[in-house]
Image: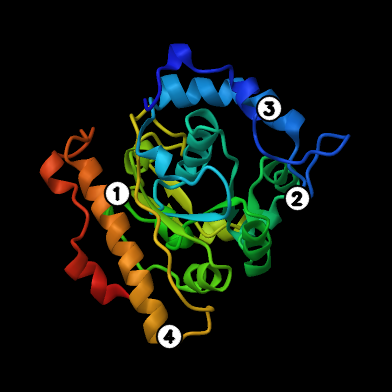
Amino acid sequence: MGNDVLSRERPQDRVKRLDIDFNSHGFDKYGVSQNTLESIAPYVSLLYDNYFSVETNNISNVLSSGRVMLISNHSGGIPTDGFLITAANVFEHDPPRLVHAMVDKFMNNFPFLSPIMRQLGQMIGLPANAKSILRDDRALLVFPEGAEGTGKLYYDRYKLIRFGTGFMRIAMETNTPILPVGFIGAEEMVPSLLKLKKVARWFGIPYIPIPPQILPIPLPVNCKINFGEPMLFEGDGNEPDQKIKENVDRVKKEVCDLLNEGLEDHSLPFFPQSEATVERWEANHTSH
């Protein structure tokens, strides 16, 4: 883990140090609840430290204040990676930062879950939401691979697929630095052998992952989160598509490199290490 667990502040105290303007009822303008964050923090900390044993590298690259957009790979059947990246910035960043993760629109199909997600700072992935968060000088987490990323089968582990380009236009329009992130471990938490799409439509979700353990419950896999250097792109977001794609390619290459660095000493429970590699940049370049 990035910091010594024994010397770390209590999780609730980390939440209290978040630079968020809560009103007298304990909510901020986006519906984030201080009480909800403080209530779940000890349980999240147990999972973070003892179940997933998260290790972070260069988390200090995340800006301590001001707007920043974290761009990460996405995988693992269910979005555990977003949950742990957010937790890392609360528990290990100095000072603690709340990262607002963009979640897929199908989350609106679960009225019982949407309010909880909002209280934790997670937002539906709409451009208006992203721009508002950034203009308020907050941290935003985006997964350009989208639901197709978490839907990758284990056979395609650590192979980046097409990055959407919308995040780049928003970052340029709002003059927001982009910080690439490589998340290692999600592929083994829920190693999807197949995914059910027709059945999933009954529940309003894109797919249901089927791992060896049958139920998509994350396994206790050690995780590593590599944070890259901030990247700032000039422009106003109205540049030609080719220019936007070139910028996206640069970010994707950085994420790819961060993954490869993390995989060098990452042990896999199902296949030999040599079989789990990120597609090199030359291969990824043709997927845009």
Amino acid at the residue labelled 4: Asp
Residue depicted at 47% across the width and 70% down the height: 168
The crowding category of the residue bearing disc 2, from other C-alpha atoms within 10 Å (few below 14, some 14 to 19, many at least 20), is: some
| Percent x, y of residue 95 | 55, 33
Q: Earlier in the sequence, mark 3 or mark 2?
A: 3
Identify the secondary structure beneath mark 4. helix
**Residue projecting furthest to the top:** 6
Identify the secondary structure beneath mark 2. loop
Residue depicted at 80% across the width and 40% down the height: 27
The residue pinned by badge 1 equals: 154
Q: Are marks 3 and 2 in contact (CB under 8 Å)?
A: no
Give above or below for 245 relative to 222.
below
CA gap between label 3 and label 2 equals 17 Å
Residue depicted at 69% across the width and 56% down the height: 109
Q: Earlier in the sequence, mark 1 or mark 3?
A: 3
Front disc: 3 or 4: 3
Give above or below for 287 relative to 54.
below
| Percent x, y of residue 34 | 74, 32
**Residue projecting furthest to the right:** 24
The residue pinned by badge 3 equals: 16
Residue depicted at 19% across the width and 69% down the height: 283
Q: Earlier in the sequence, mark 1 or mark 2?
A: 2
CA gap between label 1 and label 4 equals 32 Å
Residue situated in front as seen by the camera: 176 or 47: 176
